[in-house]
Amino acid sequence: MAFKGVDYYGIDDLFTDEEKMFRDAARQFLENEVEPLVVNAFDNEEPLNMEELAPKMGKLGMIGPQIPREYGGGGANHIQEGLLCQEVERVDGALRSFVEVQSGLVMYPIWQFGTEEQKRKWLPQIASGKKIGCFGLTEPNRGSDIAAMETVAKKGDGGWILNGSKEWISEASTADISVVYARTEDGVKAFLVPRGTEGFTQSFTDKKGAMRCGDVGTLALNDVKVPEENVLPGSTGLRHVFMCLNQARYGISWGAIGAAMSCYETALNYTKEREQFGALIASYQLVQQDLVDMLTEITKAQLLSYRLGRLLDAGKARHQQISMAKRNNVEMARMCARTARSLLGANGCSYDYPPIRHMGNIEAVYTYQGTHFIHTLILGRDITGIQAFTREL
C-alpha cells in the first residue's frame, strides 16, 4: 500500500507546490527502488549498495539538495531538505544517515570552508552520486567531548601528518573521500583524506543492533600524509564543527518524523485488521489511547520542524532551536517505535513489520549528533545562562 502521509493538522497546506513535488518524487523513488531491499539488508546486516543507488538519488537531487546549483547541488530550501529526510528515514534510518552525511557533513564543510578548487573537484561528484564521502569526527574515547579529541595533525614536509582513529563513522568502508577532523597547534582542522592514501585504513563494523542497512565503520590513521591543498582552510575551530553538526541535526529532526510516521501507520493498519476476543483490537480503549498519543506527538514534531525550517530559510534560526527539534523529535520517534512494536504483539518483533527496525535505528540516533542529554544541557544553558557540562570538584 502506497504511503499517503500523516497530516492531522493540514500541514501540507503550508508547503509550496515545489516543496511537495520534491517530496513526492523522493517518496516514489524510495518506495519503488529502495524499500523492497531494506528488510533483507537489515536482516543480514548487508549494507544497501550505495554505489548503485547514489547515482539514481543524485539524478533526483537527493544528495546535497541545499548546496548551490553551481556546485552540482539542488539549490533547494530547508523545507525541501527536511521533507527529503522525512521520506528517507521512513524507509530506513541508515539511508537518511547516508543522505545527511553526504549533504550536511561532507558537502557542507567543503562548500563553507573549502577552496574554490576543492569545491569544484568534490561537490559535483558527490552530488551526482559518483563519489561517496564520510565525516570523521567521533573517536573511541571521545564522543560528546570533541574538544578533547585524540587524533592529531602535525606539520610535515609539504603538508601534514595525521595519527589517530575514528569510529561509528557512516560510509566508513566505502567512502572515496573522508573529511577527517584532527587537533593541531592552532586548533581543530578538517582534512580531506582520499581512499587509498598510505597509512589510511577504512573498515566495516558488524554485529550492530542499529543502522544494519548502512555502512558504519572505523577510520584508522597511521602517519597519514596529507598535502596542504587537502586542508579545508576555513575549518579551524570547534565552532565550524558545530556548524556542520547542526546541518545534520536539522535533518534528523525531520527524519525522526518519518520513522514515527512509518510506525504509526503500521500500527493503525494492523489494529484495524487484527481481531482478538471477538473484536478488532482498534476498538479497545487502551489501543486507541496509544494511537492518539502517537498521532499527537507526531503532529507536534511536524510543527516544530516546519517552523525551524522556515527560520533557517530566513536566516533567523539559532542552534539551540535546532537542539530542541532534534531532542524532542527523536524522543518522540523512540516512543512511537516502542508503542507500535507493542501494539503488534509478537508480530512486532518480526522484520516483516518496520517498527522493530525503527526501534533499533532510533536508538542510534538518540545517541549520535549530540546525545539526548547533551541537547538538554545546550537548552538548559540557553534558558538559565549557566553551563552544566562540567563542574568544578
Image (tube, rainbow, N blue to C red):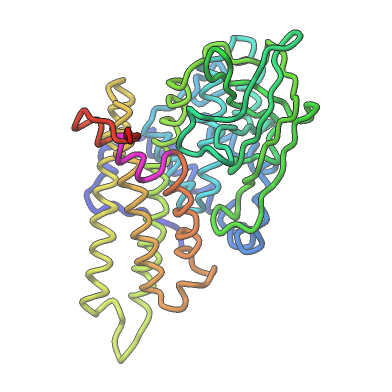
364 vs 282, nearest the viewer: 364
In the image, residue 339 lies in the stretch drawn in magenta: no
Picture quarter containing residue 207? bottom right
Residue 286 pos. (x, y %): 23, 75
70 vs 298, nearest the viewer: 298
Residue 94 pos. (x, y %): 55, 48
Q: Quadrant of the C terminus?
A: top left
Horizontal side of residue 392 vs 97, given as left or right: left
Picture quarter containing residue 275? bottom left
* Vertical relation: 371 (above or below) 149: below
279 vs 156, nearest the viewer: 156
Picture quarter containing residue 159? top right
* Vertical relation: 337 (above or below) 157: below
Task: Identify which residue is drawn at 23% across, 30% down.
Answer: 386
Residue farthest to the front, as pictured: 393
Q: Is residue 16 visible?
A: no
Task: Identify which residue is drawn at 47% across, 23% down.
Answer: 75
Horizontal side of residue 381 vs 135, given as left or right: left
Residue 41 pos. (x, y %): 64, 58
Horizontal side of residue 117 vs 379, given as left or right: right
Horizontal side of residue 49 vs 361, given as left or right: right
In the image, residue 374 lies in the stretch drawn in magenta: yes
| Predominant SS along the magenta part | helix
* Vertical relation: 279 (above or below) 377: below
Question: How many numbered dots are placed on residues in this image?
Answer: 0
153 vs 4, nearest the viewer: 153
Residue farthest to the bottom, as pictured: 278
Task: Identify which residue is drawn at 66% across, 54% down.
Answer: 206
Q: Is residue 70 visible?
A: yes
Residue 301 pos. (x, y %): 28, 47
* Vertical relation: 339 (above or below) 69: below
Magenta range is 370-378
